[in-house]
Every structure is written in structure tokens, then in C-alpha cells.
Amino acid sequence: MDFSGIRNIVILTGAGVSAESGLATFRGPDGLWEGHRVEDVCTPEAYRRDPALVHQFYDARREKLGTVQPNAAHEALARLDAEWPGELLLVTQNVDDLHERAGSKRLLHMHGELTSAWCLACDERFGWSGPMGEEASCPSCGERGRIRPDIVWFGEMPYEMERIEEALQRADLFVSVGTSGAVYPAAGFVQTARYCGAKTLEINLEPSLGSYMFDESRTGRAGEVVPAWVDELLQSDQSSPISR
Ligand code: OAD
């Protein structure tokens, strides 16, 4: 793919970008959805039915965060963010904090964050570390037992959709990294970007469900393919007449 003339970039990441850091993906043989049913831990109904089980699931995942580090893919994307002169938006479906720990700034978490909590009594959101459990008190209103993980569950609206749509409409390049393309609306971003004239590139271990919608698909480990792509893109920007 020829990257010359690209100014505005939207990058979508999924669980595959954190796999080499040691975090499980969702689908596939060792995926989180092999050990848990989505409807038991990842819906508002599940939380109403059995909050203890839902807290257990997210408390374990929050604890695991403390044992892992960003990998070469997160680091390359942070370098791109720091060096890219045009618009850039990194949209992650991941609820881990590895992109920000690597240094990405132009970042949004469309499915929420493990390190954020949401009080259902006063509607405040605030940072959270350590276990949440069922009996946590809200630091804002003091109410007990009304705090849930600030995660977008199935049936709920992902965050910042308007901002994402606007960025997709302005994008010259849309890149999807480490996502199976099984979950909408994220799986449909490629179509919006294409429709609005962007070039589209997929980077994934294997072709995803939506591979056929991309102009180009690069297969391999994110920790290898992403840094190589970032180098290529930054070099093409230096040789582009627009940046001179
Ligand atoms: P999936 O588990 O569905 O897909 C992960 C993708 O990453 C797969 O296509 C793998 O082949 C690929 N992959 C694995 N290791 C990789 C590596 N080292 N380098 C590159 N690619 C690799 O995860 P997501 O697509 O992120 O939502 O899942 C989307 C959403 O479904 C999640 O945000 C979550 C889940 O249910 C909620 O919890 C709301």
C-alpha cells in the first residue's frame, strides 16, 4: 500500500494487540469466552442476576493487569502518536491500560476501562485499582454496593461513538489491529472509513471475519507487524511533498 499523502489516521485495536503481553483474547481456544459465557458476565442482566460473579470476573482481570507490560505493538503505536503530524485517533476495544502505559495520548476506550468505576447511585465515574467487589463505597456520594465496572457490556452503547464517526469520516487511512471483527459497531468501522474514501489496512494473526473489506491484510504477530508498519508509515511521511 502506498502511504504517501496520508494525513488523518484512525487505528482500531482489539484483544490481539495485548496478546503478546500475556492477556487472553476473547475468542479462540484459550479465549476468555471459552471459560465464561458472555451472558453470565458481560451483560447488564448478568450483573442484576449475579453481581458477585460479574465482580469476580472483572476483579481477576484487573488484578492480572498489574502483572503485565505493554509490548512492542503498544510501544510502536505510542511512537506513531508522538511523531505523527496529522490527525490521529487510536480507538481501542480493550479494557486494559496498556496503550496509555506505553504512552499513547490520542486514545479512547470505546468499551470502557478496567481501571474505571461507575457509581449507579450518583452516576459519577472515577479511577479504580484493586478489587471492586459487591460492597465497595462510592468516593463521591458514599453509597455502598452501587459501584459497577465501567465496562460497556453487550446491549449497551459504546463510548464516544460520535467522535469516532467524525474521525472515520475525515480519515485518509483506517488500520485495524488484533481484532476478530465479530463485534459491532467496531467491526463496521472499516465500511464507514472506506465509504468516506480512506485506505484500509488490517493487521491480524490470521485473516479476520471482515478481512475481505480491507484494501490490504497483513498477517502475523502484532508485536512484529505493527512496528514494521509504523516505520514504513513514518518514512513515507518524511518523503511526502505535503510534509515539506
Ligand atoms: P477477539 O478475541 O474476538 O479477537 C482477537 C483477534 O486477535 C483474533 O482475530 C486473533 O487471531 C488476533 N490475535 C491473537 N493474537 C494476536 C497477535 N499476537 N497479534 C495479532 N493478532 C492477534 O477480540 P476482539 O476482537 O478485541 O467486548 O473482541 C471484540 C470485543 O468482543 C471485545 O472488546 C469484548 C469482546 O466480547 C466486550 O467485552 C464488550
Image (tube, rainbow, N blue to C red):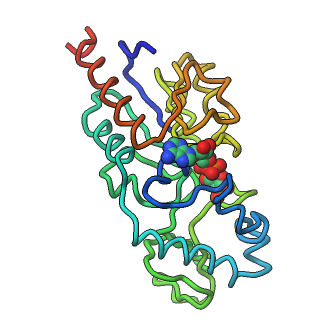
Image coordinates for residue 47, horizontal then vertical, percent? 73, 75
Most distant residue in the top direction: 241
Q: In this view of the protein, can residue 160 be seen by the observer? A: no
Q: Is residue 131 above or below residue 135?
A: above
Q: In this view of the protein, can residue 169 be seen by the observer? A: yes
Tell me which residue sits at (33%, 27%) in the image. Answer: 86
Q: Quadrant of residue 184?
A: top right
Q: Is residue 152 above or below residue 235?
A: below
190 lies left or right of 231: right
Q: Nearer the viewer, residue 40 or 116?
A: 40
Tell me which residue sits at (42%, 34%) in the image. Answer: 225
Image coordinates for residue 185, horizontal then vertical, percent? 68, 42
Q: Quadrant of residue 181?
A: top right
Tell me which residue sits at (77%, 66%) in the image. Answer: 37
Image coordinates for residue 102, horizontal then vertical, percent? 32, 53
The quadrant of the rendering that contains the C terminus is top left
151 lies left or right of 227: right
Q: How many marks do you count on the picture?
A: 0
Tell me which residue sits at (47%, 33%) in the image. Answer: 10
Q: Nearer the viewer, residue 137 or 122?
A: 137
Image coordinates for residue 166, horizontal then vertical, percent? 53, 32
Q: Is residue 3 above or below residue 188?
A: above
134 lies left or right of 224: right
